[in-house]
Image (spheres, rainbow, N blue to C red):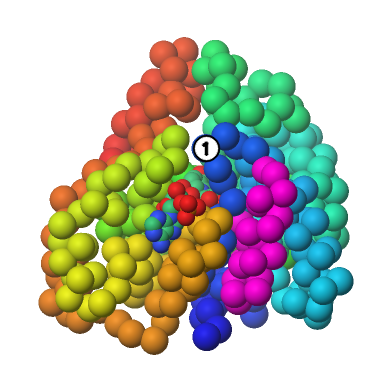
Amino acid sequence: MSIPELPLGSTNKTIPCLGFGTATSSFSGSDATKEAVIQAIKLGYRHFDTSAVYQTEKFIGEAITEALSRGLIDSRDELFITSKLWPSDAHREHVLPAIQNTLNNLGLEYLDLYLIHWPVALKEPGKHVFPFDKKDLLPMDFKSVWEAMEECQRLGLTKSIGVSNFSCKKLENLLAGAKIPPAVNQVEMSPGWQQKKLREFCAQKGIVITAYSPLGAKGTAWGTNRVMDNEVLREIANAKGKTVAQICLRWVHEQGVSCVVKSFNKNRMKENRDIYDWRLSLEELKKISEIPQQKMYDALDFTHEEGPYKSPQEFWDGEI
Ligand SMILES: NC(=O)c1ccc[n+]([C@@H]2O[C@H](COP(=O)([O-])OP(=O)(O)OC[C@H]3O[C@@H](n4cnc5c(N)ncnc54)[C@H](OP(=O)(O)O)[C@@H]3O)[C@@H](O)[C@H]2O)c1
């Protein structure tokens, strides 16, 4: 079963609706990452999501080389690779070196999508760590960093550029000065945090949303059990002979957005992929729309009394 794709803005490019996440709680990669990516390619995943901070770029690169040599794919062009600019590199003069470092790690000539990971900067370019010392937080100069992102696209180092963890207000600011509008905003989205307002805003502006943590990231350092343990989702899953994870992913798909989900387990990788030959009924969609909303990750790590954002409310511009 092939994974559907969504058009990216007004271009002729597309993004696979389902992507394979590679962030682990330890923010490290290993041969297990490489093996998981190869397995995912075998199962039909074509979109792989990473970031400088995940430390998985090198292992994804090794997996791509092996997939090509084993004939699992004929060409790198069959893949859609997303990576992200970590806040320590979110300074005009460090964006180009950062994407070049990412491409070296991956062993690729271009990315399909390069995102500003968080709307904030950090001291010490090239230091890709999380958690970091909150005293190192700095405001990001949106205009000059975005100009450097645009330069990355113009130079052919990435096919598209976008952002992550941006509120409607921050997108509005960025769009006001952008020559190339962001193609994507990658944000937390699941039945437990449905992002109705941001989805409407992005749809109007032609920005594709990619939902991260679509299962509430259960079992990770930043996740919650609330989504996978939700009774409404469990009842719907039982009635349809599906799993709660499949209900979450199908719901995300039916909202017209793309998503990235992480599993390094072969059976769960299959389960997460098998969501395109059935649908949710109107009644089921209504029940899901009534699930109480609570954000999983409030970005407290990115706020500080002397930093650019004093509280999660400020960080998300009240959109929480
Ligand atoms: N832009 C950002 O700031 C940002 C933030 C967070 C995440 N992301 C990206 O989004 C990706 C996905 O988000 P996420 O990893 O936070 O959360 P997620 O995909 O919602 O959940 C991942 C967790 O769910 C488990 N899982 C996966 N499929 C399952 C299934 N069918 N049944 C039961 N458990 C299942 C995984 O364990 P197993 O591996 O053991 O299956 C893992 O513990 C990340 O890997 C990363 O690439 C981006």
**Secondary structure of residue under mark 1:** loop
Left or right: residue 57 versus residue 249 is: right
Q: Which residues are magenta?
A: 29-49
Measured as percent of width and height from the top left, residue 296 is found at: 33, 42
Q: Say if residue 67 shows up in the picture.
A: yes
Q: Nearer the viewer, residue 1 or 7?
A: 1
Residue 212 visible in the picture: no
Left or right, 151 with reference to 288 = right
Q: Which residue is depicted at the point 81% across and 43% down? A: 101
Q: Is residue 35 magenta?
A: yes
Residue 164 versus residue 251: which sits nearer the camera? 251
* Number of marks in the rendered image: 1
Residue found 20% across the figure and 81% down from its top: 281
Above or below for 4 versus 67 = below
The image quadrant that residue 220 belongs to is top left
- The residue closer to the viewer here, 180 or 43, is 43
Question: Does label 1 point to a residue whose CB lies under 8 Å from ligand 1?
Answer: no
Magenta-colored stretch includes residue 131: no
Q: Is residue 235 left or right of residue 198?
A: left
> Which quarter shows the C terminus?
top left
* Image location of residue 139, percent across then percent down: 55, 26
Under mark 1, the amino acid is Ser
267 above or below 136?
A: below
Q: From the image, tell me which residue sits under label 1.
A: 25
